[in-house]
Image (tube, rainbow, N blue to C red):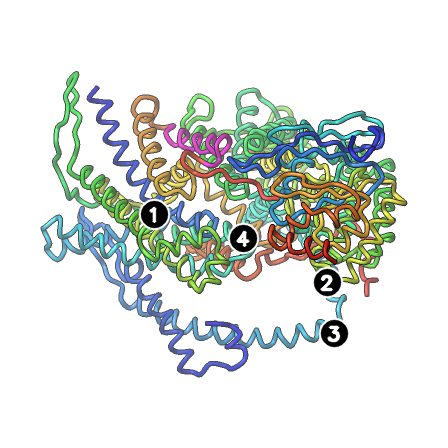
């Protein structure tokens, strides 16, 4: 039904999702299937409900109506809205980044990545008892955690910043640290909220490569909110367009680029008519 | 019946005072999003100014009570608003844009400083002044108990109502009120529109201090005793009132004040006077837990 | 008023004087009702007294102070600009060196603490004062977990101190428990109170939390003052047993042997004083080691991460509830243990010792010392306890100075005096960075 995808390949299915604030429906009856192992872009003009959509996915908002369910390979179908917000990352392995970067600024980059592995480490530390005694089992777990962090830092070309406080880094680097930190949680689904915002053209080119590499190497699925069309159109396998909380189009980048509804949403009714008219006559 | 009526009268009087102080908390919270922990001590400072003022006028042989009250009220409002201004300028303005904890700690420091400053300069002992307004109206007598509405209580309620009216007019109708409300919504944007945000914030502090000053004078006149510790307790109760009414809301602050005053009056009389503060604190904790936006406040959506 | 203008063209003397005159005018307005005038009880009724010379001095001081401050700030700004330029040219080293100095100071302080009672074994005053310092150190370290690491502003720490003290007082006077058996139980009781406070306030934002903790502290104090059957009311609990040396009491004589007779020493009241000193030294050192270790464990990093950004913690799958509650429980437990020691040392406790002022003092220690810094807490405690010992005047001005210092520190260095943060783990050993 949805672009001919079979259910097994869908990692996240959103059905009739609605989120109302008072009278305003920030998301209005949104249905979407996110294919596994691919990059799905979510675009739309400002205020289209993109971030609200992410907040519903990741447990920060409880949706007014609808079902968001994650197809977990070992844990079965998980209804994300029923999980407490921290379990979305811990149990369902859906991890997000934020539009306005949320690092732990006074902690070093390495510490940021270690905090991301809190649940595993906390368990290994025997809820601090084994940790206080300095038992070898805990030390080994900590070494593994550091190794994992160092691995991601190397892959994202951040290793020489490992001991720098995160808040002292330039903006573009902080974005990458946030992605590295999210990757340390072992996500199945990585939700990136405008990762290219504030990046210069060279940096956003690097981001493109990084995202493609991640999907290829790490076998994860990426859900991407983005304004930078050079990123969305180049990396996305599939794009969903929101406007006023409703889905107005869905398809491949090519299809989206030529969709009259999308052009209308971005350019406004009259301009779009003109443009379409011009294209037809050309 | 008469006893209950008496508690109602006492509670409303007390509540009016709490409400006046609570407005200061609520306005400051509205405009810069912090608890002005030293606000209770501003009120205490004004009570001391009132004591000095009344004593001075008596020494000069002024016998007309309305005249003395008016003079002391004006003097107290003037001096106390300077204190309000100075507190903001010294302890809060340099910290704008800092972490959330910093201005709060600075405010606690300011509260400790003011308390000890008054203790050192004015003495640690309780200051009594002779009752100024005596007499009242007997309202109701049942079972040998007479409920009495004293003239000073009438005065407190009248002054509070008059101030509230003036204040509502100031906030809703004047250019300062518009600037003040604009700053509450978006300080950066207000500044971009060419409004002096610093000045607006300073004025807000001075206004809050003025209302606390009126409360201080009223309490001095009503109870006749003042000490350097009254600001702490009254401050917390007024803050509770502001939270209960919905912090940021002016009518809410007054409503909260009245409710707290009534609860305190009835609780002291029917349950136990010793635990009346426990009642207030428990209300504070319960409101914050279950309805952090208070009775008339707008709910705050967590921004992600 | 724009600082940029000042930095570029220095103001003239006239401008400086005008600025200072403005401040002096404010000082005059502030000073008239509080300094210039005061009232005193004379023969049954209040009389107004004037202190114009004092007010004059105050205003003059404000004028000169402003002149000097403005001038000093301008100088400082210039120097900082040049220094920043130099520092940008050669980065790195300074941080590492300051860590070394701090570490060295820490060990030095430890050494002094260890030998102090031996050096002053016949000076009760010195050992007593040092014991008081250590109580505050311990309280400060406990609160540091909550405020400094977890970033939760707790204005009711004295409540846990009180719970510990009363728990020991009741266990020992009512049930005959000894100091060492009651210690963990009282500590755990305080931890339970910490959880009881933490649970309802989980969802609260920072400043609301502060007010709730304050309210909680006051509730505890009011209950202790009024529940006479349990706590003895305002009179408190007296004749609380002192700790013994493995069952040997510090008394002149006893049927079952005393500390002095067992070791063949002549009885001296100093034995107990010195013993108490070492008990609190041991307790605070344990606290220090515990907190230092926890900081390097997942839970400690979680506390700090929560202080930095709670929402990010949630998004990473961290259970904020547990992290917050553990900070509250640990802080409360350490406060409770300090309370047990306090009760055992004083032999008498009453609600008077656990007012909001006490909470404020402990908070001041943590804030002034630099939130999260262990050594800073020690320095602040020493200053706090020694200040009033310098003389009666200082005792009177102690809280005034502390209030002022809290404001100044926040304005000047919101991170506290010793605000350097040492990472809990490093990729490369310290000092090898470029």
How many residues crowd around disc 1 within 10 Å: few (fewer than 14), some, or many (20 or more)? many
Q: Chain of mark 3?
A: C
Q: Which residue is mark 3?
A: C89
Discs 3, 2 touching: Cβ within 8 Å:
no
Q: Which of the labelled discs sits on residue B102, or is there none? A: 4
- The label nearer to you, 4 versus 1, is 4
Residue C141 inside the magenta-drawn segment: no
* Closer-to-camera residue (B108/A223): A223
Q: Which of the labelled discs sits on residue B228, or is there none? A: 1
Please tell me which residue is depicted at 74% across the width and 49% down the height of the picture. A258
Query: Label 4 to label 1, Cα distance in Å?
Result: 25 Å
The answer to whether tags 4 and 1 share a subunit is yes
The answer to whether tags 2 and 4 share a subunit is no
- The label nearer to you, 3 versus 2, is 3
- Pick the quarter of the image with the N terminus of chain B: top left
Q: Chain of mark 1?
A: B
Discs 4, 1 touching: Cβ within 8 Å:
no
Please tell me which residue is depicted at 81% across the width and 52% down the height of the picture. A234
Q: Which residues are magenta?
A: B275-293
Single out the residue that lies furthest toward the right. A217
* Closer-to-camera residue (B103/B175): B175
Can residue B59 be seen here? The reply is yes
């Amino acid at each position: 039904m949805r672009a001919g995808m079979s259910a097994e390949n869908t990692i996240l299915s959103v059905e009739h999702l609605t989120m109302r604030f008072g009278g305003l429906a920030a998301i209005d009856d949104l249905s979407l299937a996110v294919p596994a192992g691919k990059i799905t872009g979510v675009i739309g003009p400002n205020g289209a409900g993109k971030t609200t959509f992410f907040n519903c996915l990741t447990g920060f908002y409880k949706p007014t109506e609808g079902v968001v369910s994650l197809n977990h390979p070992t844990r079965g179908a998980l209804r994300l809205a029923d999980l407490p917000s921290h379990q979305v990352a811990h149990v369902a392995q859906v991890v997000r980044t934020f539009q306005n970067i949320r690092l732990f600024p006074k902690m070093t980059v390495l510490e940021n990545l270690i905090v991301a592995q809190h649940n595993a480490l906390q368990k290994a530390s025997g809820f601090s008892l084994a940790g206080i005694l300095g038992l070898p089992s805990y030390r080994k777990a900590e070494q593994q955690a550091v190794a994992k962090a160092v691995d991601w830092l190397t892959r994202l070309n951040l290793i020489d910043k490992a001991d720098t406080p995160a808040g002292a880094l330039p903006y573009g680097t902080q974005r990458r640290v946030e992605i590295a930190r999210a990757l340390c949680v072992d996500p199945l689904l990585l939700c990136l909220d405008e990762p290219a915002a504030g990046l210069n053209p060279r940096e956003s080119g690097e981001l493109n490569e990084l995202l493609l590499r991640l999907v290829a190497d790490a076998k994860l699925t990426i859900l991407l909110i983005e304004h930078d069309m050079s990123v969305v159109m180049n990396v996305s396998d599939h794009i969903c367009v929101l406007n006023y909380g409703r889905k107005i189009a869905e398809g491949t980048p090519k299809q989206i680029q030529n969709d009259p509804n999308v052009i209308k949403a971005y350019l406004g009714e009259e301009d779009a008519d003109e443009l379409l008219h011009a294209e037809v006559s050309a | 019946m008469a006893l209950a009526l008496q508690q109602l009268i006492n509670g409303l009087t007390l509540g009016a005072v709490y409400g006046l102080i609570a407005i200061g908390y609520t306005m400051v919270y509205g405009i810069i999003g912090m608890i002005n922990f030293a606000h209770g001590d501003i009120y205490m400072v004004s009570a001391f100014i009132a004591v000095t003022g009344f004593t001075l006028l008596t020494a000069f042989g002024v016998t007309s009570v309305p005249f003395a009250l008016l003079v002391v009220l004006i003097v107290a409002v003037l001096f106390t608003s300077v204190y309000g201004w100075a507190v903001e300028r010294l302890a809060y303005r340099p910290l704008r844009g800092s972490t959330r904890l910093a201005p709060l700690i600075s405010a606690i420091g300011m509260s400790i400083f003011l308390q000890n400053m008054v203790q050192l300069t004015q003495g640690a002992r309780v200051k009594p002044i002779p009752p100024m307004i005596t007499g009242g109206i007997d309202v109701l007598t049942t079972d040998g108990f007479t409920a009495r509405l004293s003239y000073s209580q009438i005065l407190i309620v009248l002054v509070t109502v008059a101030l509230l009216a003036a204040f509502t007019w100031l906030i809703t109708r004047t250019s300062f009120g518009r600037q003040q409300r604009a700053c509450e919504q978006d300080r950066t944007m207000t500044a971009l529109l060419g409004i002096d945000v610093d000045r607006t914030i300073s004025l807000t502090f001075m206004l809050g201090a003025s209302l606390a000053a009126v409360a201080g004078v009223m309490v001095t006149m009503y109870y006749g005793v003042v000490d350097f510790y009254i600001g702490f307790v009254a401050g917390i109760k007024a803050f509770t009132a502001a939270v209960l009414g919905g912090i940021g809301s002016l009518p809410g602050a007054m409503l909260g004040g009245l409710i707290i005053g009534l609860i305190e009056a009835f609780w002291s009389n029917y349950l136990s006077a010793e635990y009346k503060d426990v009642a207030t604190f428990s209300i504070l904790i319960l409101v914050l837990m279950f309805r952090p936006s208070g009775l008339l406040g707008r709910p705050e959506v967590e921004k992600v | 008023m724009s600082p940029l203008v000042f930095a570029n063209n220095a103001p003239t003397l006239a401008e400086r004087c005008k600025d200072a005159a403005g401040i002096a005018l404010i000082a005059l307005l502030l000073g008239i009702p509080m300094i210039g005038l005061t009232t005193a009880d004379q023969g049954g009724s209040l009389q107004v007294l004037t202190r114009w010379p004092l007010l004059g001095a105050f205003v003059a001081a404000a004028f000169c102070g402003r002149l000097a401050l403005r001038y000093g700030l301008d100088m400082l700004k210039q120097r900082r600009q040049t220094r920043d330029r130099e520092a940008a040219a050669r980065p790195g080293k300074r941080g590492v060196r300051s860590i070394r100095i701090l570490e060295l100071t820490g060990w030095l302080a430890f050494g002094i603490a260890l030998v102090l009672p031996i050096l002053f074994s016949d000076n009760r005053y010195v050992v007593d004062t040092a014991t008081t310092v250590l109580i505050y150190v311990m309280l400060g370290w406990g609160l540091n977990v909550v405020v400094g690491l977890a970033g939760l502003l707790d204005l009711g720490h004295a409540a846990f101190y009180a719970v510990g003290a009363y728990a020991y007082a009741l266990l020992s006077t009512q049930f005959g428990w000894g100091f060492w058996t009651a210690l963990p139980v009282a500590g755990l009781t305080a931890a339970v109170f910490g959880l009881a406070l933490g649970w309802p306030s989980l969802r609260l934002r920072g400043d609301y939390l502060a007010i709730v903790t304050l309210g909680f502290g006051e509730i505890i104090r009011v209950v202790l003052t009024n529940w006479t059957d349990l706590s003895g009311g305002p009179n408190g609990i007296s004749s609380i047993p002192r700790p013994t040396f493995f069952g040997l009491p510090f008394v002149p004589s006893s049927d079952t042997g005393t500390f002095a007779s067992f070791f063949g020493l002549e009885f001296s009241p100093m034995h107990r004083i010195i013993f108490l000193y070492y008990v609190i030294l041991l307790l605070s050192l344990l606290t220090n080691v515990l907190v230092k270790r926890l900081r390097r464990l997942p839970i400690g990093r979680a506390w700090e991460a929560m202080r930095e950004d709670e929402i990010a913690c949630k998004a990473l799958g961290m259970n904020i509830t547990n992290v917050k509650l553990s900070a509250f429980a640990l802080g409360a437990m350490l406060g409770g243990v300090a309370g047990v020691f306090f009760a055992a040392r004083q032999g008498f406790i009453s609600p008077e010792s656990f007012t909001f002022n006490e909470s404020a003092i402990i908070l001041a220690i943590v804030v002034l010392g630099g939130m999260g810094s262990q050594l800073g807490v020690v320095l602040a405690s020493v200053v706090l306890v020694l200040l009033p010992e310098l003389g009666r005047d200082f005792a009177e001005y102690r809280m005034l100075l502390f209030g002022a210092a809290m404001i100044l520190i926040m304005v000047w260095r919101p991170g506290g005096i010793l605000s350097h943060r040492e990472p809990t783990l490093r990729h490369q050993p310290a000092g090898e960075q470029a």
